[in-house]
């Protein structure tokens, strides 16, 4: 493969150039004329479908049902819980006209669906027997961001699921909000081999409409942290604003307790950024659309041997659901580089000499080197190798995350740690003022709270809310 077909930027030195080249050249995305709106090409959409299948199955085990609410939200409805909308208003995109005629009321393009869903919840929930109400939808959302867009990581239109649930008791809601976070954690860790930090957001960083927000945070190779997803306990904030109430078993009126939780296509960007290398994508086997590619090596000067090689390669692919790359108009070297760029976890070569020996040559994307494997054992060896690659990518990323967390006991130490591209950990009071002060002095935000703590806050000396991790972030 030529220089311009492969990735030319080095991940270590030029991360953002590396990222952009990788996702374009690996055919994951295409840009459009609208900034922040990208095409998810089949290569990335297939991975999103895998994420969807994983999460959707887990939600269904909890009794969550899928539904679909409209894209357009009337202005009055969006304003109904003014508190939560306040800071977000500049990001809302509006439909104002049909053809040349102004609409009587402008319509927001959904940035999130609390308002439109909770209007319906108020109609549907009457008695404690209607609870819990557990709904999810898989949709696109539009948020007209003004920060620089980055494909997957920050865009104006993205794909997600949003779960919205109503419960009779606070206890039931609080149980669920943690269970959902754990499903999200497993999706990152088990499917995408990304270790995450799970915890509660600070007062400043939580969703304004929530009583508290739980999040997962991941670490990018450039030392920046990124919020990986959120699960909010809304308490009765929305049920009071939207009059979502029920008669309890004693016949008294009560407001429901609610949660909302979301997981977006940002996850794909995190996965790409964490695992990729100078040759391009490195995909964990469980999320890779093609897990194994077979490249038959044929020679026009040896037509008979080549035909046998092709036949054997076809048979192996059919038996094992491996991908056959029999494009003989491209050299083997070109094809190898292309599958490396696309991150396929395992490559198998088979040529006339291998066939004589009854072996194939197996390479793994995440490490150098090749091994000869007897054809009869190829399926077993490759299955084990895929498991090993999945585990090794996770272990490597986890070691990186853990070794980058450094305990600090002053703002100066925190500043030094984050400027080295690491994460700082400290017992902290969690107050909004203190967070603003830390941000101004160091450029870092709190990510989330890892554990409770009896220590004093490292900034104010007041009792700590808990042990928080801080870092520069996306
Ligand atoms: C942008 C414009 C208008 C985020 C916005 O996190 C409103 C909002 O409410 C807004 N950007 N949010 C917060 C979304 C909260 C919550 N919604 C359900 C989630 C997960 C899924």
Image (cartoon, rainbow, N blue to C red):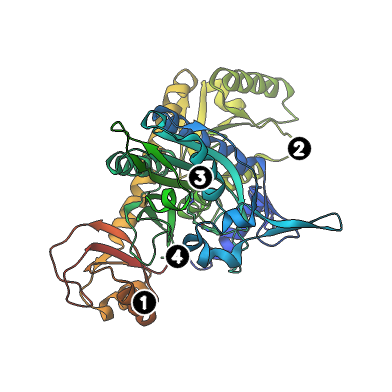
Question: Which residue is labeled 2 in the image?
Answer: 329
Q: Secondary structure at mark 1?
A: helix
Helix, strand or loop at mark 3: helix
The residue wearing badge 4 is 222
Q: In the shown orientation, is residue 297 left or right of residue 463?
A: right
Q: Earlier in the sequence, mark 1 or mark 4?
A: 4
Q: Is residue 241 above or below residue 66?
A: below
Whether residues under marks 1 and 4 lie with C-beta atoms below 8 angstroms apart, the answer is: no
In this rendering, position of residue 197 left or right of residue 85: left
Camera-side mark, 1 or 2:
1
Q: CA distance from mark 1 to mark 2?
A: 60 Å
State the CA–CA distance, disc 4 to disc 3.
40 Å
- Give how far apart the Cα atoms at labels 2 and 3 are: 58 Å
Circle 2 crowding by C-alpha within 10 Å: few under 14, some 14–19, many from 20: few
**Would you say the beta carbon of the disc 4 residue lies within 8 angstroms of ligand 1?**
no
Q: Which disc number belongs to residue 436?
A: 1
**Residue 70 makes an appearance in the image:** yes
Marked residue nearer the N-terminal end (4 or 3): 3
């Amino acid at each position: 493969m030529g220089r311009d077909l492969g990735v030319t930027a080095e991940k270590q030195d030029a991360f953002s150039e590396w990222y952009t080249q990788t996702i374009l050249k690996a055919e994951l995305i295409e840009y459009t004329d609208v900034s922040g709106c990208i095409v998810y090409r089949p290569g990335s959409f297939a991975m999103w479908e895998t994420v969807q299948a994983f999460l959707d199955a887990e939600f269904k085990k909890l009794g969550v049902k899928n539904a679909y609410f409209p894209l357009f939200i009337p202005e009055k409805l969006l304003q109904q819980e003014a508190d939560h909308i306040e800071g977000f208003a500049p990001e809302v995109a509006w439909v104002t006209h049909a053809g040349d005629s102004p609409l009587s009321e402008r319509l927001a393009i959904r940035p999130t669906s609390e308002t439109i869903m909770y209007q319906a919840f108020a109609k549907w929930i009457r008695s404690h027997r209607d609870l819990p109400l557990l709904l999810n939808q898989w949709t696109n959302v539009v948020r007209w961001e003004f920060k620089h867009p980055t494909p997957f990581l920050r865009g104006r239109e993205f794909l997600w699921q949003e779960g919205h649930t109503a419960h009779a008791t606070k206890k039931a809601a609080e149980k669920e909000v943690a269970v959902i976070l754990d499903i999200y954690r497993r999706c990152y860790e088990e499917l995408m081999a990304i270790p995450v930090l799970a915890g509660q957001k600070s007062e400043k960083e939580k969703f304004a409409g929530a009583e508290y927000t739980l999040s997962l945070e991941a670490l990018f190779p450039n030392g920046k942290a990124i919020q990986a997803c959120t699960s909010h306990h809304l308490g009765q904030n929305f049920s009071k604003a939207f009059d979502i109430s029920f008669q309890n078993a004693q016949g008294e009126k009560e407001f429901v307790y609610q949660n909302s939780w979301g997981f977006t296509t940002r996850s794909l960007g995190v996965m790409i950024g964490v695992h990729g290398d100078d040759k391009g994508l490195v995909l964990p086997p469980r999320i890779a659309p093609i897990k194994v590619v077979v490249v038959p090596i044929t020679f026009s000067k040896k037509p008979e041997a080549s035909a046998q090689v092709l036949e054997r390669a076809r048979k192996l692919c059919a038996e094992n659901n491996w991908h056959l790359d029999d494009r003989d108009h491209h050299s083997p070297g070109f094809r190898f580089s292309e599958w490396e760029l696309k991150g396929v976890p395992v490559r198998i070569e088979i040529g006339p000499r291998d066939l004589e020996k009854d072996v194939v040559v197996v390479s793994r994307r995440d490490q150098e080197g090749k091994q000869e494997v007897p054809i009869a054992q190829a399926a077993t060896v490759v299955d084990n190798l895929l498991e090993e690659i999945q585990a090794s990518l996770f272990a490597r990323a986890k070691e990186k995350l853990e070794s980058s967390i450094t305990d600090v006991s002053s703002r100066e130490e925190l500043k030094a740690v984050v400027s080295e591209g690491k994460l700082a950990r400290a017992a902290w009071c969690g107050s909004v003022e203190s967070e603003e002060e830390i941000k101004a002095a160091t450029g870092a935000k709190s990510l989330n709270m890892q554990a409770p703590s009896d220590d004093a806050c490292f900034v104010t000396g007041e009792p700590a809310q808990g042990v928080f991790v801080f870092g520069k972030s996306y």
